[in-house]
Image (cartoon, rainbow, N blue to C red):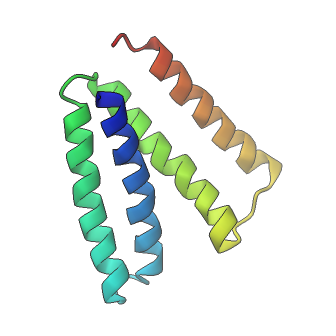
């Protein structure tokens, strides 16, 4: 169940990061509320995952899901660049996340 909690936490990290971008420096109320509420719920799910997963594994995977998810969302929704070097960097992050997942006994 911890891995499911961690996945939910990571997805919510993408949600709140995207909402923060849309909040325009917390000047747009709806996006600002989504940012704050999303981050609180994301942290809560992360804390549930950390009950049984090692700190380093849980935290790195949580931030990695957020980083790569935000990267993909930025490309698909915000029209940010997808040059080969940026895509390679994201692929390396994904490779690292998978290695941590498989190296973690649980």
Q: Position of residue 43 (x, y in %)?
A: 24, 49
For the question of whether residue 26 can be seen, the reply is no
The image position of residue 100, as x and y in percent, is: 47, 21
- Rendered image quadrant of residue 5: top left
Quadrant location of the C terminus?
top left
- Which residue is rendered at x = 40% and y = 72% of the image? 20
- Picture quarter containing residue 33? bottom left
Left or right of 73 on screen, residue 29: left
Determine whether 97 is above or below 25 in the image: above
Question: Picture coordinates of residue 26 (x, y %)?
Answer: 33, 82
Residue 13 sits above or below residue 60 on the image: below
Q: Residue at the spot x=60%, y=61% of the render?
A: 73
Answer above or below: position of 86 versus 95: below
- x and y percent of residue 28 in the render? 36, 89
Return the residue found at the far right: 84
| Residue lying at 76% horizontally and 57% vertically, measured from the top left | 82
Task: Please name whichever residue, 2 or 31, is drawn nearer the observer in this view of the structure.
Answer: 2
Give the answer, above or below, for where 100 lies relative to 77.
above
Residue found 36% across the figure and 10% down from its top: 105
Residue 54 figure quarter: top left
In this image, 11 relative to 97: left or right? left
Decide if residue 15 is in sight here.
yes
């Amino acid at each position: 169940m911890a891995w499911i909690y961690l996945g939910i936490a990571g997805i919510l990290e993408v949600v709140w990061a995207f909402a923060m971008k849309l909040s325009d420096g917390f000047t747009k109320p709806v996006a600002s509320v989504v940012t704050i509420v999303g981050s609180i719920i994301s942290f809560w799910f992360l804390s549930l995952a950390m009950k049984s997963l090692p700190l380093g594994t849980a935290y790195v995977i949580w931030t990695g899901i957020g980083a790569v998810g935000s990267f993909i969302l930025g490309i698909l929704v915000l029209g940010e660049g997808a040059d080969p070097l940026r895509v390679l960097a994201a692929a390396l992050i994904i490779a690292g996340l998978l290695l941590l997942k498989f190296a973690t006994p649980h």
